[in-house]
Image (cartoon, helix red, strand yellow):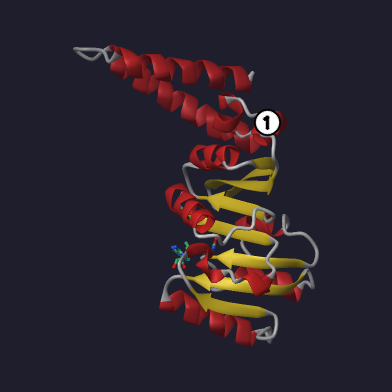
Amino acid sequence: MLSTRLAQIASFVPEQARLADIGSDHAYLPVYLASNGKIDYAIAGEIAQGPLQAATSQIKKYGFTHKIIPRLADGLAAIQVEDQIDTIIIAGMGGLLTKRILTEGQSEGFLSNKERLILQPNNHEQLLRHWLATNHYQIYDEKIIEDHGKIYEIIVALPKKEIDYTLKELYFGPVLMEKKSAVFQKKWQKILQTKQKVLMNLKNAQYPPEDKIGKIKKEIIWIKEVLE
Ligand code: SAM
């Protein structure tokens, strides 16, 4: 059984997608999508031998060696032009690593700027939204979910020439702040409490750092506004 997190990520993959699952580990996601007849072709990219072996075994076990190709590579280097990939998933890694994979992939020519990106960073979501906006991707869907007590955000983006996001939209997620789901409110209530504590400590410091205080005050105002 696929985890709630992976099942939610899978729900954003379009029918008949040609998928690259980067950092595929056991290839659970492409095998699940192929089992459900949703995809005809996938690359399961892996940088490490162990997970690549696990992916290869999983693909064999379910009889998808003709549809899912395990490939040892760093990031988007797993993608070859002949694959005609139209959907890229990078899930379950830190936001910094995800950003590095996208940046290098783009500068090395592995992105054709047509692909749908489905990103699920474990942290630093804001950093990725800034990368997307700077690199002309529109965030056309987002979801925030809770799985085994952990909160995850899924960001779905497509290339677009004109991108115009406010800093506040990139901070909370343009779609997430519109939807304001219960999980979104739970996440930001918790962050609000933490920031209020940090602000108090900063104010009580012997030499209160005015720049940090100003930044955190602005964040607290934003969070309160979005939670209203
Ligand atoms: N994507 C799966 C998920 O969401 O459950 C697996 C996530 S697992 C925590 C991260 C996987 O990414 C590991 O198997 C790791 O070897 C792989 N990985 C890390 N850096 C990578 C890179 N630069 N290129 C490809 N795979 C990478």
Residue at the spot 50% in from the left edge and 54% down from the top edge: 107
Q: Is residue 33 left or right of residue 202?
A: right
Front residue (pair 111, 168) = 111
Image coordinates for residue 151, horizontal then vertical, percent = 55, 45
Image coordinates for residue 15, horizontal then vertical, percent = 80, 63
Residue at the spot 61% in from the left edge and 56% down from the top edge: 5
Q: Is residue 191 left or right of residue 116?
A: left
Which quadrant: the C terminus? top right
Can residue 187 be seen in the rendering of this structure? yes
Look at the numbered disc 1 and give the secondary structure of its residue: loop
* Image position of 3 with respect to 185: above or below: below
Can residue 181 be seen in the rendering of this structure? no
* Image position of 50 with respect to 63: above or below: above
To which residue does mark 1 refer? 180
Residue at the spot 66% in from the left edge and 73% down from the top edge: 83
Residue at the spot 68% in from the left edge and 46% down from the top edge: 159
Image coordinates for residue 57, horizontal then vertical, percent = 55, 85
- Farthest left residue? 206
Front residue (pair 43, 184) = 43
**Quadrant assignment, res 115:** bottom right
* Image position of 219 with respect to 51: above or below: above
* Image position of 215 with respect to 33: above or below: above
Front residue (pair 42, 85) = 85
Image coordinates for residue 7, horizontal then vertical, percent = 67, 60
Which quadrant: the N terminus? bottom right
